[in-house]
Image (cartoon, rainbow, N blue to C red):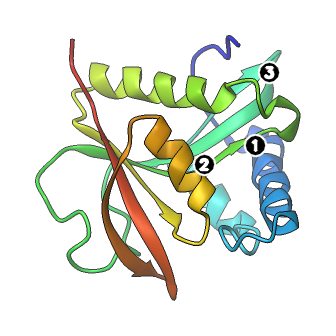
Amino acid sequence: MDIGRRKQANPSELGNVYQLLVNATAWLREKGLSQWSRVYPVERFAKEVSAGQVWYWGIADEPIATVTVYENRPEYYPAGAWEDSATAWYLCRLAIARQFVGQRVGESVLASLEGDAAAAAVQALRLDVATSSSFLERYYVGQGFERHQVVEIFGERAALLEKTIRRE
């Protein structure tokens, strides 16, 4: 599925992009998973939108996928996690509109990010998943990510995953 290029979210798009997170959180809860056990605070999301960290892909200007990208190691990672000199993008809150599940939108989002990272001379994409959500870890490993280590984040065990960016 062609999802086009990523677009930087702006405050006027906040509601539509944020709704992707609300729906993904509800879906994870329905599955009984602890990943995203509560909806991400809209106030924090709005700050990330204003800071230019939230991106989305859309069809006819309707967001179908979103991700928050930090260019620096998030402050909530414990000491010793990702403390190296590699340039990396830290991916958070990757969500796909439920009606597009199974249409490889997630793979397209990750491929888009990988291409943009390579063009920006970024060396790695990094993210974390709750170890209790083993299917999410399997999904990302299937997309070329490798487990780096397991840490505790906000009282829950999380696997830190990394994908090395290959520059052509």
- Residue 142 location (% of width, % of height): 48, 37
Measure the C-alpha gap from mark 3 to mark 2.
17 Å
Element marked by disc 2: helix
Q: Quadrant of the C terminus?
A: top left
Q: Is 58 left, or right, of 72 in this rendering?
A: right
Callout in the foreground (3, 2):
3
Q: Residue furthest bottom?
A: 155
Which label's residue is closer to the chain start, 2 or 1?
Answer: 1
Along the viewing direction, whichever of 129 and 53 lies nearer the viewer: 129
What residue lies at 59% left-to-right and 72% top-to-bottom? 132
- Residue 88 location (% of width, % of height): 27, 45
Q: Which residue is mark 3?
A: 61
Q: Which residue is mark 1?
A: 17
Residue 49: give its label.
Answer: 2
Residues under numbered marks 2 and 1 in contact, where contact means CB atoms less than 8 Å apart: yes
Callout in the foreground (2, 1):
1
Q: Can residue 7 be seen in the rendering of this structure?
A: no
- Residue 45 location (% of width, % of height): 65, 59
Q: Is residue 13 above or below residue 80?
A: above
What residue lies at 57% left-to-right and 17% top-to-bottom? 5
Residues under numbered marks 1 and 3 in contact, where contact means CB atoms less than 8 Å apart: no
